[in-house]
């Protein structure tokens, strides 16, 4: 049951590194209350899920790293290699020089088609390495240019070429007070496209994680590294092998299966299907007991509504639109995105 | 990583350029301990084996052999460029990348633009092409010049059109030194406004700076530090070079004409939060302007050194209530962090703002222009140049008037309540 992770853009790659690091260090950490046999099964399952084995015993992450600028990928490659515990595959990267200028249109319409073949080839090679492939985990931000635009393009391609596999996108929601001038445009374009091609969208807000660091962890000078580690910790605990109610002896549940229901349609779900409980006795990463809640709820409506509102105000004054039409994203494309997202907001509100 | 080429034009442009290259070398020397030619250095420098004759000497990796600035030096008088070539930086410049003449432009935009423009057009194009060929991913041209004189102002803006035609995909960022009120060049308003029309049409981004503001800042630094290093500490370009953490250049213009960006560089002479407060005060701008009482269209904050995201967010939240942003861009911030501090400091902040506070400077300039133009003072110096007509003047001043009007319209929205526009409603 292997998952291939696709890390896109600066944010995606920095988080991806922390996730693999957290997964492996959890798998090596103390077993807590469970038996030795169970611990071994846990470790084996985790390894198989996220890493492939190399001759000299250093696990290689099942990951594809994509960015339109080289510096972040280079940093992540060397950080992983320096850890001595795991590393990224030698040919698992795709890099360019120029970046995407925080422009969704550039990522989607220019970089996407231009590098489609190369990127999909690397992904295919990684998938072929898996004995039993369960799906894709795509990590990206929605405020920038590469993660958001190229991420949307790649997800669409994955839907076309691997329509039977599950795709889950981990998306980072930018700080409300502004990190990128056109973050609202990039966000609505990303979300509206992903709603069509992804199976599940897992959202994390920078503001929320920032608060966790400040209030719950009391970190004084919070760095992006702190934020990414908290996030990786959360993701790690979602993805590590667990039991579900039915199968008690094998860590074979496909973690992505629980997310099969597309983000929109929950109103007709029977209560028993809506709530899945997975558990394990094995401790996660130094915590004796921990629980993670992943939910599809109306919690999303307020932030989504706010982003759509801001993007709409900016769109009404036509600000920055010329940067997008320059690369083939026209006003109609914006209107389509607005329409789909208003529908999402309305659907959630009607529940 | 991408490369940039610096084009320094005229006396002022070349003098500033010289300080820039000196600082760039010192910045890299401070972090590049092993003398390896890496991607960071390659953004502004080539690595050349000087023993090889001709063009084949470029080395792309490994140890630094001889660094050559990615620069084109242009001046219609020889004095300044000659001084540079005899000074400590002489080996940094490739002598093939110079264009000089003897007589100068006589503080006359028309001579710089029309006469020298057509005379040197081919040579200029050739030098640009050469410098572009040495780059594998050219992203930006940085042009440094003054507005009040003849060469920097006239020829400096002439070459913008050449760059736009030849390299349409490459950004053109211009650092323009505007004349202060007490400028000793009488015709500086003419030169400046004729140049501004060109900047409006052919530059992607303009950082206007005036000498008086620089003097004021240096006096303040002197008072605080008592070390009197004039001219070397405050260089707006210094923030654009960086070592292992390169800055992404995303200067976004909401509308094509609004390309004047007010720059503000704060070095760590004060506490971290104080640095942020100062960045928005009128006493620390590189142009005489008061951004706090004007309207922001967008603002970019680039911090260097040991500053974390929480410091940045905290200060944005703290200062935001006292700043006015245009209604459709209330969160118009672009933030970036670079862990490498500038040489000799522990941290620094560069704030680039697209703000209507540039308007008074432009209006003042227009007034000075009109005082001369109404009397037709010195006009004959310009009109006697081939290709110059009175229409050049009237077009230039109406281009400026149109720009001032756009800023006016934005300012009018300043204190109005932010109204959310009606959104699409969906039939379920």
Image (cartoon, grey):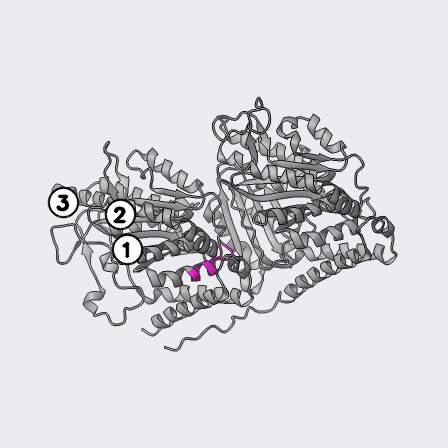
Which mark, residue A162?
1
Viewer can see residue B220:
no
Tell me the subunit letter for badge 3.
A
Q: Residue at x 53, y 68 (%)?
A: A316
What's the magenta region?
Answer: A176-189
- What is the spatial separation of the Cα atoms under label 1 and label 3, in whole angstroms? 33 Å
Give the number of the mark in front: 2 or 3: 2
| Mark 2 and mark 3 residues within 8 Å of each other at the beta carbon | no
Tell me the subunit letter for badge 2.
A
Which residue is at the front of the view, B412 or A287?
A: B412
First-in-chain label (1 vs 3) = 3
Q: Does dot 3 land on a helix, a strand or a loop?
A: helix
Give the percent coordinates (x, y) of residue B2: 52, 41
- Relative to residue A149, is residue A122 depicted above or below? above
- Relative to residue A206, is residue B112 depicted above or below? above
Q: Are marks 2 and 1 on the same chain?
A: yes
Asked if residue B331 lies left or right of residue A44, the reply is right
First-in-chain label (2 vs 1) = 2
Q: Residue at x 84, y 51 (%)?
A: B383
- Give the position of the C terminus of chain A as an image quadrant: bottom left
């Amino acid at each position: 049951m292997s998952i291939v992770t696709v890390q896109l853009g600066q944010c995606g790659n920095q988080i991806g590194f922390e996730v693999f690091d957290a997964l492996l260090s959890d798998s090596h950490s103390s077993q807590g209350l469970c038996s030795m046999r169970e611990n071994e099964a846990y470790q084996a399952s985790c390894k198989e899920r996220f890493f492939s084995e190399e001759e000299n015993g250093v696990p290689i992450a099942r990951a594809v790293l994509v960015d339109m600028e080289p510096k972040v990928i280079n940093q992540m490659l060397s950080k992983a290699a320096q850890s001595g515990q795991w590393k990224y595959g030698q040919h698992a990267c795709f890099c360019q020089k120029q970046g995407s200028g925080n422009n969704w249109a550039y990522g989607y319409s220019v970089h996407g088609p231009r590098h489609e073949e190369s990127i999909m080839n690397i992904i295919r090679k990684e998938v072929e390495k898996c004995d039993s492939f369960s799906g894709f985990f795509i990590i990206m931000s929605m405020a920038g240019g590469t993660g958001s635009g190229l991420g949307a393009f790649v997800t669409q391609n994955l839907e076309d070429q691997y329509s039977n596999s599950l795709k889950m996108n981990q998306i980072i929601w930018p700080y409300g007070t502004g990190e990128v001038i056109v973050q609202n445009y990039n966000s609505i374009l990303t979300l509206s496209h992903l709603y069509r091609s992804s199976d599940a969208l897992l959202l994390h807000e920078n503001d929320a994680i920032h608060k966790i660091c400040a209030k719950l962890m009391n970190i004084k000078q919070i760095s992006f590294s702190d934020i990414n580690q908290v996030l990786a910790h959360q993701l790690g605990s979602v993805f590590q092998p667990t039991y579900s109610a039915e199968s008690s002896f094998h860590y074979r549940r496909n973690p992505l299966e629980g997310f099969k229901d597309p983000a929109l349609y929950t109103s007709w779900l029977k209560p028993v299907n809506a709530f899945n409980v997975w558990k394990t006795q094995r401790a996660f990463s130094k915590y004796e007991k921990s629980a993670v809640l992943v939910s599809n709820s109306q919690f999303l409506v307020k932030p989504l509504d706010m982003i759509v509102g801001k993007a709409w105000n900016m769109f009404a004054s036509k600000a920055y639109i010329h940067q997008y039409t320059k690369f083939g994203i026209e006003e109609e494309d914006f209107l389509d995105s607005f329409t789909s997202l208003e529908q999402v907001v309305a659907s959630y509100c009607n529940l | 990583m991408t490369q940039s080429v610096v084009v320094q034009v005229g006396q002022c442009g070349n003098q500033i350029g010289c300080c820039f290259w000196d600082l760039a070398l010192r910045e890299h020397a401070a972090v590049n301990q092993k003398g390896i030619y890496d991607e960071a250095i390659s953004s502004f420098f080539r690595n050349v084996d000087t023993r090889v004759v001709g063009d084949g000497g470029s080395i792309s990796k490994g140890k630094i052999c001889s660094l050559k600035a990615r620069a084109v030096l242009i001046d219609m008088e020889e004095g300044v460029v000659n001084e540079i070539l005899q000074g400590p930086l002489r080996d940094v410049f490739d002598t093939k990348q110079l264009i000089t003449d003897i007589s100068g432009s006589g503080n006359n935009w028309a001579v710089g633009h029309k006469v020298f423009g057509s005379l040197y057009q081919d040579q200029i194009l050739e030098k640009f092409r050469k410098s572009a060929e040495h780059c594998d991913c050219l992203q930006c041209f940085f042009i440094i010049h003054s507005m009040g004189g003849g060469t920097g102002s006239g020829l400096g803006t002439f070459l913008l059109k050449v760059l736009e035609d030849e390299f349409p995909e490459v950004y053109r960022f211009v650092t323009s030194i505007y004349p202060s009120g007490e400028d000793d060049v009488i015709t500086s308003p003419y030169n400046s406004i004729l140049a501004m029309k060109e900047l409006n049409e052919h530059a992607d981004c303009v950082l206007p700076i005036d000498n008086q503001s620089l003097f004021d800042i240096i006096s303040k630094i002197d008072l605080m530090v008592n070390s009197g290093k004039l001219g070397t500490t405050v260089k707006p370009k210094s923030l654009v070079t960086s070592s292992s953490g390169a800055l992404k250049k995303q200067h976004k213009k909401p509308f094509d004409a609004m390309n004047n960006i007010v720059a503000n560089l704060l070095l760590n002479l004060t506490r971290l939060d104080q640095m942020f407060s100062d960045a928005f005060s009128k006493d620390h701008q590189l142009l005489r302007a008061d951004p706090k009482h004007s309207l922001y269209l967008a603002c970019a904050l680039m911090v260097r050194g040991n500053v974390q995201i929480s410091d940045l967010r905290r200060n944005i939240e703290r200062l935001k209530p006292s700043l006015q942003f245009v209604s459709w861009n209330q969160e118009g911030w672009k933030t970036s962090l670079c862990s490498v501090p500038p040489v000799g400091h522990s941290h620094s902040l560069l704030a680039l703002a697209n703000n209507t506070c540039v308007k008074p400077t432009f209006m003042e300039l227009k007034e000075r222009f009109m005082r001369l133009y109404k009397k037709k003072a010195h006009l004959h110096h310009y009109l006697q140049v081939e290709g110059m007509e009175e229409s050049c003047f009237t077009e230039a001043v109406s281009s400026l008037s149109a720009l001032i009007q756009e800023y006016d319209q934005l300012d009018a929205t300043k204190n109005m309540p932010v109204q959310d526009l009606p959104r699409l409603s969906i039939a379920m």
